[in-house]
Amino acid sequence: MGSLNTTFRDGFILVGFSDWPQLELFLFVFISIFYSLTLLGNTSIIALCGLDPQLHTPMYFFLSHLSFLDLCFTTSTVPQLLINLQGQDRTITYGGCLAQLYIYLSLGSTECVLLVVMAFDRYAAVCRPLHYTTIMHSQLCHALAMSSWVGGFINSLIQTGLVMTMPLCGYHLNHFFCEMPVFLKLACENTGGTEAKMFVARVIIVALPAVLILISYAHIAQAVLKVKSTSGRRKAFGTCGSHLLVVFLFYGSAIYTYLQPINSYSEKEGKFVALFYTIITPILNPLIYTLRNKDMKGAFWKVVIRGRPL
């Protein structure tokens, strides 16, 4: 069997949800609505973080990066999915599939690193409050954000390159977009150490950040429990609760998809899990951060309700 770039030059067929034709109309309407709300919600957060001087802090700087990531993340898959659900064209070119895989992995990897950066920011705010402004200065924030993007794109470049060397047995991708586990399921048996190399890369980009975040929040919990006032503890937990909820949503689905043995990975279940982290999570992020955050609600009130310039 030849390699990907010789055997599948004409492209792939995305099976999508054709196994459940009765769901396709419902999913098309549901996803269209959620995608529109995702664009609106995350764009609003980016705008508010840029317009309101009170939100020009490290926490909201990283939040605006997260919102931009979510916008790009969901846009890398949803348009293709909506075309797929209409049943007009379920094919994707070889180049288009690789581009989608690369972009999707880049954005997902970047978010993995960015969530660690946001955890470090919360650690500095809660555990080192007197030195917070000194630690989280502007140059460090920009360097951390840039490192997240660069690290994500380098990881994706490595993994996409490994995919291009894998021999594949077939051209039907049992998914609604070009995702790594589906390629691994399609791989022929003689892949050598390619899958092992990919797994190591996924452990580094998914498991390691998750461990670092848990360590950060263990220190944060210790610091919060030492606070004597109830209002102080409530404020500290409120500051970190939104980020921790986003972390659980993102890493829970990422660990299920990328860290379980490929032999036990279910393509049918994987489609619905992928729907969760490509459709649901990007819309939950703005809801979580706005409904649980008085600064965001205050900025929204000034801009939208009162119509006052910031």
Image (tube, grey):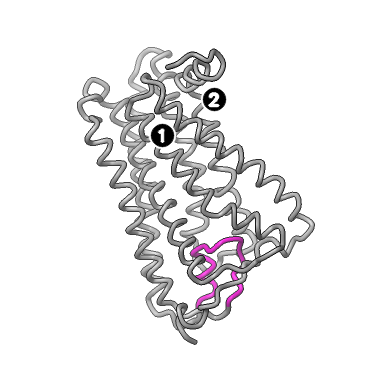
Q: Is residue 122 above or below residue 209?
A: above
User: Looking at this rendering, what residue extends furthest in the right direction?
Assistant: 22
Q: Of label 2 and label 1, which has the lower sequence position?
A: 1
Give the secondary structure at mark 1: helix
Residues in magenta, as a range: 171-187
Q: Residue at x 39, y 39 (%)?
A: 65
Mark in front: 2 vs 1? 1
Q: How many marks?
A: 2
Tell me the residue that label 2 is attached to: 291
Q: Quadrant of residue 137?
A: top left
Q: Which residue is mark 1?
A: 63
The foreground one among 254 and 261 is 254
In percent of width and height, residue 282 lies at 53, 42
Q: Nearer the viewer, residue 253 or 221?
A: 253
Residue type beneath disc 1: Leu
Q: For mark 2, give the secondary structure.
A: helix
Residue 215 in picture, x, y percent from top left: 33, 40
Q: Position of residue 189 (x, y in %)?
A: 49, 81
- The disc labelled 2 sits on which kind of residue? Leu
Label 1 crowding class (10 Å Cα cut-off): few <14, some 14-19, many 20+?
Answer: many
Query: Where residue 52 is drawn, which disc sits there?
Result: none
Residue drawn 49% across and 61% down? 100
**Left or right placement of residue 168 versus residue 211 in this view:** right
Q: Nearer the viewer, residue 295 or 115?
A: 295
- Which quadrant is the C terminus positioned in? top left
The answer to if 173 sits in the magenta stretch is yes
Occupied quadrant, residue 165: bottom left
Residue at the image point whose x is 50% and y is 48% from the top = 252
Q: Position of residue 222 (x, y in %)?
A: 34, 28
Q: Is residue 263 magenta?
A: no
How far is mark 2 from mark 1, CA to CA? 14 Å
